[in-house]
Image (tube, rainbow, N blue to C red):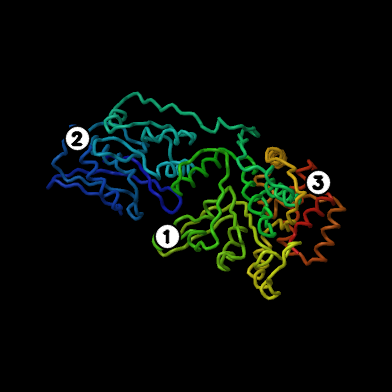
């Protein structure tokens, strides 16, 4: 029995599907079994047309295509080509072992790519399940970014048949597109970054404390909350933070491209981390993912390795804010439904912005606040202490004045972030400072005696929780990295404490 391999999604991960063929005597028929979706059953007509249009005669037999394992629902048009090849090569002596085949067929036999192709192959590559694959030629430019896979590109069914019949296989030539971006290497691993700043910090006038906090946030991926009057620059800073974030590895670039594909976007393969900013009226399912039959990824998952920005934070529903505590703490989220259960990573930089009161004028030096004490208290009580405890830096923005001037560019800030990132790599850290585990904090966040005394006093005076203590240490570690200090000193702890929400 001949067999080729393809894949389908089970949750967010690709599952290998063995595609088998059986031809038996009986009334001529053509059936696909193994929980095939409507799109796969429609493939029968596309396959028939493509084969008959290219001088292939269907054998007068019962043709059965089996998609194994049969207990997983298969979806997608990527099964067209593999089915056509199994039928056309059924009587040949072709070695089909370890071949993955992907492609949608046109009625004339032309091979096309579908939207899920890149994400499927990348997921298989991350699992180490794929070594060589036949793919549409039109998809090669994107697929070539995935390392350690031999791709054989075809544009027509006849080319695919000739390829499998050939004794000499020619792998498609491809280069990694990441090479066009600047990078540095550490321990034989390349780290890529960009040097384009369409949104530049030079546009932000004044707000020196907020810009300093933004630099610390970017250098260690520390969650940050901006509080200030409308128009003071909260969103401006948040949107510019994306362009000064730490460099990324090739695997992270590929992961971002996979998320782009799942979102229906064309992947750029640029070393630019994602930026997601859902509206405060968004539903729980759109933010965290969900679906009654098939769980879909939400904004929290799509922000993995990048930024999740909540503007007008108190206007988000209480359920959304409390549900955000788990991905902020555990860096993953699990969606459970009757029909499916999936888990995906949620390691992102959380940025939030809020007004000081419902009318926004509580901190203004010129405008009068129209809110009562009860309204202000109700507005701020929408944010629970356990939620706020997961935010490393809290910044109160100053009022805008005519004397405010530009003071720093994104290029300069980005250079500081990259320098701090290199120090974290050289310490042997597997994660950025803001994502260190409890054990890693004890190993890398070392305080001198004066710094420890200040921290102990703060613990007693402010009744800091264990989580707050760790966040202060991690923030201080980043502040120390920005000045290339090997140990956390008193001045670093004091600055970290100044960013704690009072």
Is residue 475 positioned above or below 122 on the image?
below
Viewer-nearest residue: 225 or 77: 225
Quadrant in which the C terminus appears: bottom right
Q: Would residue 164 appear left or right of 297 to someone viewing this image?
A: left
**Residue 340, numbered circle:** 1
Viewer-nearest residue: 288 or 96: 288
Picture coordinates of residue 145 (x, y %)? Answer: 49, 35
Q: Disc 1 or 3, which lies upstream in sequence? A: 1
Looking at the rendered image, the disc whose residue lies closer to the viewer, 3 or 2, is 2
Picture coordinates of residue 427 (x, y %)? Answer: 72, 41
For label 3, the crowd category at 10 Å Cα-Cα, with few meaning under 14, some 14 to 19 and many 20 or more, is some
Picture coordinates of residue 398 (x, y %)? Answer: 75, 56
Mark 1–mark 3 Cα distance, whole angstroms, equals 47 Å
Viewer-nearest residue: 377 or 495: 377
Picture coordinates of residue 341 (x, y %)? Answer: 45, 59
Residue lying furthest right: 450
Q: Would residue 120 appear left or right of 332 to someone viewing this image?
A: left
- Answer yes or no: do the residues labelled 3 and 2 have beta carbons within 8 Å? no
**Residue 53, numbered circle:** 2
Q: Disc 1 or 2, which lies upstream in sequence? A: 2
Point 58% across, 61% down: residue: 324
Secondary element at tag 2: loop
Secondary element at tag 3: loop
Mark 1–mark 2 Cα distance, whole angstroms, equals 40 Å
Q: Quadrant of residue 291?
A: bottom left
Secondary element at tag 1: loop
Mark 3–mark 2 Cα distance, whole angstroms, equals 73 Å
Q: Quadrant of residue 25?
A: top left
Looking at the rendered image, the disc whose residue lies closer to the viewer, 1 or 2, is 2
Q: Would residue 501 appear left or right of 96 to someone viewing this image?
A: right
The residue pinned by badge 3 equals 487
**Residue 2, numbered circle:** none
């Amino acid at each position: 029995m001949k067999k080729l391999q393809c894949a389908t999604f089970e949750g967010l991960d690709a599952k290998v599907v063995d595609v088998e063929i059986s031809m038996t005597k009986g009334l001529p028929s053509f059936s696909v079994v193994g929980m095939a979706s409507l799109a796969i059953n429609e493939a029968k007509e596309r396959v028939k047309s493509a084969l008959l249009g290219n001088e292939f005669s269907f054998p007068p037999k019962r043709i059965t295509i089996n998609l194994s394992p049969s207990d997983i629902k298969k979806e997608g048009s990527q099964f067209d080509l593999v089915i056509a090849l199994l039928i056309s090569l059924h009587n040949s002596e072709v070695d089909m072992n370890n071949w993955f085949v992907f492609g949608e067929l046109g009625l004339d036999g032309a091979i096309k790519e579908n939207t899920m192709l890149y994400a499927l192959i990348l997921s298989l590559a991350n699992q180490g399940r794929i070594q060589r694959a036949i793919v549409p030629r039109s998809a090669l430019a994107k697929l070539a970014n995935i390392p350690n896979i031999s791709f054989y590109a075809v544009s027509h069914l006849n080319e695919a048949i000739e390829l499998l019949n050939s004794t000499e296989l020619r792998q498609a030539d491809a280069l990694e597109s990441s090479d066009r971006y600047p990078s540095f290497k550490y321990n034989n691993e390349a780290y890529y970054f960009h040097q384009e700043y369409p949104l530049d910090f030079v546009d932000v006038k004044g707000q020196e404390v907020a810009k300093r906090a933004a630099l610390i946030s970017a250098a260690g991926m520390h969650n940050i909350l901006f509080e200030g009057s409308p128009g003071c620059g909260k969103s401006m800073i948040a949107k510019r933070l994306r362009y000064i974030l730490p460099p990324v590895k090739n695997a992270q670039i590929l992961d971002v491209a996979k998320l782009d594909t799942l979102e229906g976007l064309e992947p750029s393969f640029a070393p630019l981390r994602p930026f997601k900013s859902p509206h405060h009226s968004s539903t729980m399912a759109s933010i965290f993912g969900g679906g009654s039959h098939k769980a879909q990824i939400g904004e929290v998952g799509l922000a993995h390795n990048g930024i999740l920005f909540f503007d007008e934070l108190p206007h988000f529903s209480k359920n959304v804010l409390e549900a955000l505590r788990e991905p902020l703490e555990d860096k993953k989220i699990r969606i459970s439904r009757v029909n499916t259960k999936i888990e995906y990573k949620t390691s992102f930089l959380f940025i939030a912005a809020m007004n000081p009161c419902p009318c926004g004028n509580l901190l203004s030096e010129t405008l009068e606040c129209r809110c009562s004490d009860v309204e202000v208290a109700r507005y701020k009580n929408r944010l629970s202490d356990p939620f706020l405890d997961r935010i490393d830096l809290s910044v109160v923005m100053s009022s805008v004045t005519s004397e405010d001037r530009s003071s720093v560019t994104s290029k300069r800030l980005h250079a500081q972030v990259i320098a701090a990132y290199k120090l974290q790599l050289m310490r042997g850290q597997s994660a950025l400072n803001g994502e260190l585990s409890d054990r890693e904090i004890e190993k890398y966040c070392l305080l001198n005696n004066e710094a420890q005394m200040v921290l102990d006093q703060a613990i007693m005076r402010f009744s800091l929780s264990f989580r707050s203590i760790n966040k202060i240490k991690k923030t201080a570690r980043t502040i120390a990295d920005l000045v290339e200090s090997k140990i956390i000193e008193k001045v670093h702890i004091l600055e970290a404490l100044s960013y704690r929400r009072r």
